[in-house]
Amino acid sequence: MPSFLFDRKAKIQPHVQREGVRAMATTPKTDYDVIVVGAGFGGPVAARKCARAGLDTLMLERSDVPGEKVVSGLVIPIYGFLYGPEFIRKGNPPIERPICSVVNRLVKGGRIVKTDRSLRMPRPFTLGYAAYCKPFCTWLADRATKAGAELRTRTAAVDVIMEDGEVVGVVTDRGEELRARVVIDAGGTQNPLAIKAGIRRKYPPEAIELYMLWDYEMPKRDVDEVFGHSMEFFHAYPEEGIGAPLGYGSTFYIFTYRDSIHPGLGQFLVTEGEIPNLAKLIPQYQENFTARVERWKRDIAPRTRLRAVMWDVCPIYAGLIPSAREMPIYTGGMIVTGDAAGFEASAFGDGVPNAWFSAEIAGETAVEAVRAGDASASFLARYEERVRAHPFIIKTISDRRRWDMRELLAGRDEAEFARKVRDHWGIGAFRYGNMGGPVLKASAKALRESPLVALEWIEMFRRYFDNWERNRFDPLSGTRRGLTPVPQARGEA
Amino acid sequence: MAMTYQEFPGVEWVEGAGDYIKVDAEKCSGCANCVRVCLAQCFKIAGKKAVVDNLDRCMECGACWYVCAPDAIRFSWPPGGTGFRTLWG
């Protein structure tokens, strides 16, 4: 069984495995083919790709355990699993709850005045999977180290080493100089490294949402009864006081986990041209929600106990604001991926699928660069070409539907509000840009190329559900037992 | 050693993080944008300038840095293995 969570230290010693020879490094290595900065959701995917190709690969992670600094109430949309890394689809990642439907509620005077359940799938098919970041990122990092990548935790990359205008390595917070043919930056939204390298600037505040999350324990039978396999959004005009003005933040949502729920909400750092007093507003929205909304007070609150409060920022509108969108995503010797590159889907605010897609492309590009002995900017330009050609990345970061909710602020047209919600977070998600168009197109293409892929998908849906129903993963202890085996039919294991 | 705070359950802060967020008093315009967006109340205004009061409950989000128009805030990561962490993110 893979080790989890609390016994990570056994695994962080450097190890090298190439051409069948296994040796323990006696002094810390300082020279690699590839250095991946960050072991969140994207970093391990890139590192695994490089390590499997036989490259000497190092992952640097500033936290003690991968994922423990990642804050994201998380339902990973299904397109990440279907079109992302095969090893995730064919593995058994620690998921908290299969999410089969999105329930959209319109709130007025604390009451639910309209409910839209149009976006739903019959189980075992899902729209996504809820997960806690720490066990999931740890699972991903384990896959990368098992493939031969080295992981150094408690190590922040604070600067790059430049030679002749190209990145040739990184400097750690202990002053150690580590060299690599290619540096892959998967360092997350704030990303001081790529700024130091002169590739990127800090995002304009208009692109950044500050979001706050609350984790509540709730017995599984209660989550099953109150929510089932759904997650809920609570939409309201600003005078309700339970969320940011429309189009300026994530409406109050409740993500559902195995025996907990994860409500959250957010607001952009610039709202209607001003920098709002978010220190006051965001806690106020939550206080109002829990004090006023009947569904919370009656159905949910009596069965819950607050366990954690957290927040972070994410670049949800980076794809919609030209100064953010036009920043480079590579330079000589360095590739930037995921949130660090602004690849946050703007409609639902999901960053994980694009982190996976871009990390796979980055890994593939790095392998080619090392083999060709050429990590120049002109060689790495193929990374950007592939990102642009990808069926999801550019499409999802430039979706304007959440932004356009602002148009509703001028009037109070409830019918129009309900229609927009349905078009955006309801069944319309399948008709418009974000999920629908690209998902249907990519599915049709995949099925044309190999009709058997349908069986692979169905097998994944069933196995994920089976593992979940039998409670084969415990995030607290990290115990995993009796997981449904993955068929070893074809492709990589 | 790790610190916890009653108002932010489920999160702890490992010591040794140091001054990873700093305000350049010369550049600071005293606009208080940083004060307005910081959910941990890390900043205060003293003598018409923003100063870091303490980073005890900072979750390293960088909101202060993004909203600083004169670019007076310096933001970096705390040393590896220090600062905030959670099991419930």
Image: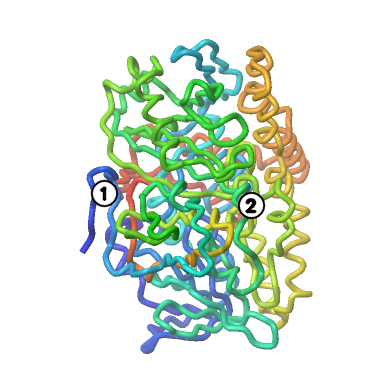
Q: Which mark is residue A343?
A: 2
Q: Is residue A214 above or below residue A353?
A: above
Colour mode?
rainbow
How many numbered callouts?
2
Which chain hosts label 2?
A
Residue in view at x 52 percent, y 63 percent: A187
Residue in view at x 64 percent, y 45 percent: A317
Residue B77 place in picture, x, y as percent = 44, 66
Q: Is residue A375 visible?
A: yes
User: Left or right: A475 with respect to A140?
Assistant: left
Which amino acid is tagged 2?
A: Phe
Instruction: Please tell me whether mark 2 sits on a helix, a strand or a loop.
Output: loop
Query: In terms of depth relative to the viewer, which is nearer, A150 or A282?
Result: A282
Which amino acid is tagged 1?
A: Ser
Residue position for label 1: A477
Q: Is residue A36 above or below residue A219?
A: below
